[in-house]
Image (tube, rainbow, N blue to C red):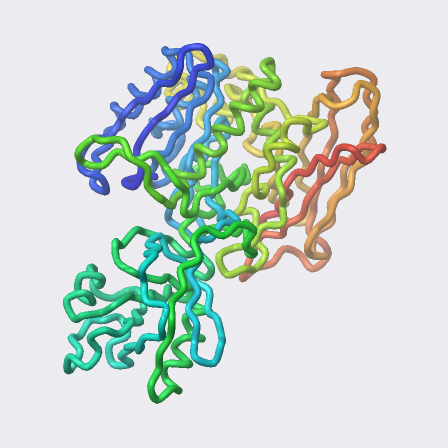
Amino acid sequence: MGTISCEVVGGKRRSGSVFTMVCSGPFGNESCSSADVLVGLDAAVKDGVDILSISLGGDSIPLDQDPIAIGSFAAASKGIFVSACAGNFGPNNFTLNNEAPWMLTVAASSVDRSFRVSVKLPSGKVIPGESLDQPSNFPKSSLPLYYSTESPTCDMDPLDDSHRGSIWVYEAGGRHNVVAFAKSHGAKALIFIFPKKVGATIILTKMDFPGVVLANKEGSDLISYLISASDPSTSIVFNGTVLGVSSAPAVAWFSSRGPSQATSGILKPDISGPGLNILAAWIPSDDTPEYKIQSGTSMAAPHLSGVAALLKAVHPTWSPASIRSAIMTTADADVSDELLESALYFAKGAGHVNPSKAADPGLIYDITDDDYVSYICGKFGEEGARNIARRVVNCSKSMMEEELNYPSILLAPKGGAAAKVTRIVTNVGLARSSYTVSVTISKTVVSATVTPHMLTFNELNEQKSFTVSAEWSAGGPPTSGNQFVEGKLTWTSNDGKYVVTSPFVISAL
């Protein structure tokens, strides 16, 4: 994402894959010109790819000035699915990029895998941590601990050499190369403690030195022991890879959050996928392909590209919008944020991707190329629409942003009036089926209505429309604090087989 991972990758079913570099320079300092980005995207479209995976971005800018939005519009118009990283500027709000409605905007979440290390105290208490460095010959005996209350971030030299051979405890945020510093003073291992603000997000890097990374909560337990013990010590046990760990999925601390600045009437991000400590292909400075554990929304977007490829194989006639709808409406909504509290839609999107459910969603929200043209006409006028489409467009029809047939719904009632939109769903489940709607709102300050209450289908690909309206209750909208109220709109088939859920947000802004 941004200066972290700059590539555009396309996959073509019959002709292998296309890898297009659009940035240059050493890793972390890439230069990405708008012209190169647009040329790279256009080359992928010309090559006839089916999927575009974009791990590239920066600040949010208007869509008619954004080369990624412009290039991906051409791709979507050709029936190419576009998956893009949401950004690595979290956890603050309004930090998204790649917000265009014709692309899937992907947040990063954790997976239930841990590179486990156990820090064992003399009392028998075990503090869980993680490490990519798992030495097989590390001493199993207890070693003394060194921690400086005067310099918890290791910014000062120890007063003497009495701590040589100790395990050093380090609070992240100090000197850049603490590993070399600790090694030069005879440390046997390092225990890193992450700041409180990152919560459960443990970002791992290989140190080529025995080390343990602790989340702040577990690190606080260790520091409490260090301060209270007269002669603190611990043993470190490297447990290797452990699966099925709890607190997953959780949105990573760094994952960018909504609301979207470029598309304020559309709920973004769309979805979350694995993006924390992912084994990823890697090309270092000597251009020799390798693999490396990486974190970022750049790791999450390719996961969703893979899911989209699987869905396209199962449903070759589906449009990119249909595939996005299937992914969003079947997502697992039970996702935590980095503080292990319930994640908001502006952090997790519709939830964590569930590929198995997405393959058979029951109903889909489709969007045609003409719909997108009407959308950009309504948002930017004829001149702006031409900038995005890069062709002459007919703006005789236009629509407001919230009117786009998106799988999520964001409404902003003004004054005492209700906000209202219409959505259209297409039956892709059972030919003869009925669905009943339910709406759940998190706060009583909002009332919402869906009409009709039931949709009945008699054949596949039949379409039905419904209207959603929302208004503030007598007390009016919130004037301070969180000015967004969350809910969900769910269509459930009468046989219980299909549950089609749309994130639903009401805004006071």
In the picture, residue 480 is in which quadrant?
A: bottom right
Q: Is residue 206 left or right of residue 486?
A: left
Please report the residue visible at 37 percent of the width from the left and 56 percent of the height from the top. 131
Above or below residue 249? Residue 475 is below
- Find residue 343 and report its horizontal and vertical position in percent: 56, 53
456 or 499, nearer to the observer: 499
Q: Nearer the viewer, residue 127 or 394?
A: 127
Q: Is residue 316 above or below residue 331?
A: above
Query: Residue at (70%, 50%) from the top-left corner?
Result: 441
Left/right placement of residue 373 relative to residue 207 reads: right
Q: What number of labels is visible?
A: 0
Give percent across and percent down for residue 389: 41, 17
Q: Could you tell me which quadrant the N terminus lies in?
A: top left
Position of 38 with respect to 99 (left or right) is: left
Residue beneath the point at 32% across and 22% down: 19
Q: Pinpoint residue 153: horizontal percent, then vertical percent.
A: 26, 70
The image quarter in which residue 495 lies: top right
Image position, residue 337 (x, y; %)? 52, 55
Q: Residue furthest bottom?
A: 230
Task: Report whether 342 appears left or right of 99.
Answer: right
Task: Report if residue 142 is visible in the image.
Answer: yes
One can see residue 403 in this view: no
Q: Residue at x 35, y 21 (%)?
A: 41
Q: Is residue 313 above or below residue 504?
A: above
Q: Quadrant of residue 387?
A: top left
